[in-house]
Amino acid sequence: SLEEVAPNFFTLSPDSPLRERIQRAYRWYSPRFSPCDVPRFADVGSITEDWSVMRGIRDFLVARYRNLPEPPTHILGFDARGFLLGPMISVELGVPFVLMRKAGKNPGILIESEPYEKEYKEKKAEAMTIRRGSIGKGSRVVLVDDVLATGGTALSGLQLVEASGATTIEFVAILGIKSLKGVQLSHSYGNGRFSKIPFFALVDESVLTEANCGDTAGYNGARIIGYREALSRI
Ligand code: AMP
Ligand code: MG
């Protein structure tokens, strides 16, 4: 049920039942109703609020990684939405879940990635960290996030695993925005040192149709309603 859309870039095939279930659940918001100025903000909450889709994603990924000849030894999740998906997989596989965060959020001695541009968020470059020793030499790591966009975040994860003496066996996200070429960023980085690492986006942006728009049509009020105001309107 997997399709290779580009070398070492996989997605669920169009007729996959799981792809259909994700498409039915996923909501996106326009800039008017979203925290970021992106054309279609994909709401991971629309996935987490559907426990049955969450269970479907968990079962699919657990089976996928459990059945590898050499299963992962660690799951590495990206702050913050990778934290929603990684633990439910890691506890089933019985392996550690490691947190990739900014230096200001992580304790201990840290390994830091190169700074990367996030076209989709703050314009200034950001770097990510993991705690030194959380992943060791010879570890086999799966990287997890909700969305793969321009790919800067994913590349940070690849750098941190490499700099720990470990191997990334796959990057996985629910949604991969193919048109932003995030996979190419990692695969072409550093003379192709990561070109063999598989990227797996369960679905691509074609699932974010007009019917999946979460915007409240015709709403002209404020997006954020304060506590007292909300109380007074109950
Ligand atoms: P990037 O580093 O550009 O691949 O951006 C990926 C990160 O930004 C992920 O951690 C996502 O949580 C978030 N992100 C980027 N684009 C979107 C989008 N259109 N909708 C929701 N989240 C996004
Ligand atoms: Mg994120």
Image (spheres, rainbow, N blue to C red):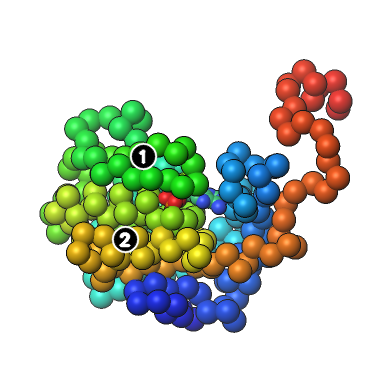
**What residue sits right under mark 2 in the picture?**
186
**What residue sits right under mark 1 in the picture?**
125
Task: Judge the density around disc 1: few (<14), some (14-19), many (≥20) Cα neighbours within 10 Å.
Answer: few
Tell me, for residue 7, which label it has, or none.
none
CB atoms at circles 1 and 2 under 8 Å apart? no
Residue at 19% from the left image edge and 32% from the top image edge:
109
Answer above or below: position of 160 versus 14.
above
Ligand 1 has an atom within 8 Å of the beta carbon of the residue at disc 1: no
Q: Amino acid at mark 2?
A: Ser
Q: Position of residue 136 (x, y in %)?
A: 16, 50
Residue at 60% from the left image edge and 76% from the top image edge:
17
In this image, 41 relative to 79: left or right?
right
Identity of the residue furthest to the top in this view: 228
As helix, strand or loop, the secondary structure at mark 2 comes to: helix
Q: Position of residue 51 (x, y in %)?
A: 61, 55
In this image, 50 relative to 218: left or right?
left
Q: Amino acid at mark 1?
A: Ala
Residue at 63% from the left image edge and 72% from the top image edge:
20
In this image, 210 relative to 169: left or right?
right
